[in-house]
Image (spheres, rainbow, N blue to C red):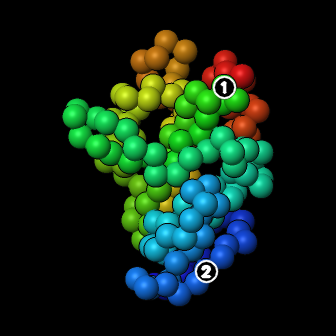
Amino acid sequence: MQISRLNLPAAKVKLREGDKGTEIFDPLRGKWVVLTPEEWVRQHFTAYLASDLGYPPALMGNEIAITLNNTSRRCDTIVYDRSATPVAIVEYKASTVRVTQKTFDQIARYNMVLQVPFLMVSNGLSHFCCRLDPAGRRYIFLREIPCYEAMLEHAGAK
């Protein structure tokens, strides 16, 4: 896999050659996973959330299973508040994939299950964050991704 430049701060990642090709260590899952273009974005984005925006790694989870319409799905990353209540879902795409309405439709479907106030999408080049309005009827796009404390404040979380 060719490693692409991202519009994110450089992250200290661990790479190795495994049975199925190049692997990257995912500190949130505590294991080595196959390096895909989407995984490259995930590792850099979660590192950015933790190092630059104060998101506690212990309160983030990668590849979290949910059930939607009797079908098992996986959220790329879920961010939790300090009482372990989900407050954000993050969806990743490879840097070669354009973020479209379809991407937001996917994450909004996941949110039918989790009902979090924040949704984020990144392809490593473009990053989007929106929050549910106080009435819970529509999403408001934010100019930037909030730091963890500001997100909790907006979410009314602990």
Is residue 74 shown above or below 42? above
Is residue 92 shown above or below 158? below
Res. 30 image quadrant: bottom right
**Alpha carbon separation for disc pair 2 and 1:** 33 Å
Name the residue at the top extreme: 135
Q: Is residue 123 left or right of residue 13?
A: left
Q: Quadrant of the N terminus?
A: bottom left
Residue 100 place in picture, x, y as percent: 37, 51
Find disc 1 in the rendering and name its residue. 83
Mark 1 is on which residue type?
Ser
What kind of element bears circle 1? loop
Asked whether residue 141 appears in the rendered view, the answer is no
Q: Is residue 100 left or right of residue 122?
A: left
Q: Name the residue rendered at 77%, 45% in the picture.
A: 54
Q: Is residue 14 left or right of residue 98?
A: right
Find disc 2 in the rendering and name its residue. 15
Mark 2 is on which residue type?
Leu
Res. 13 image quadrant: bottom right
Residue 131 place in picture, x, y as percent: 55, 30
Residue 129 place in picture, x, y as percent: 56, 41
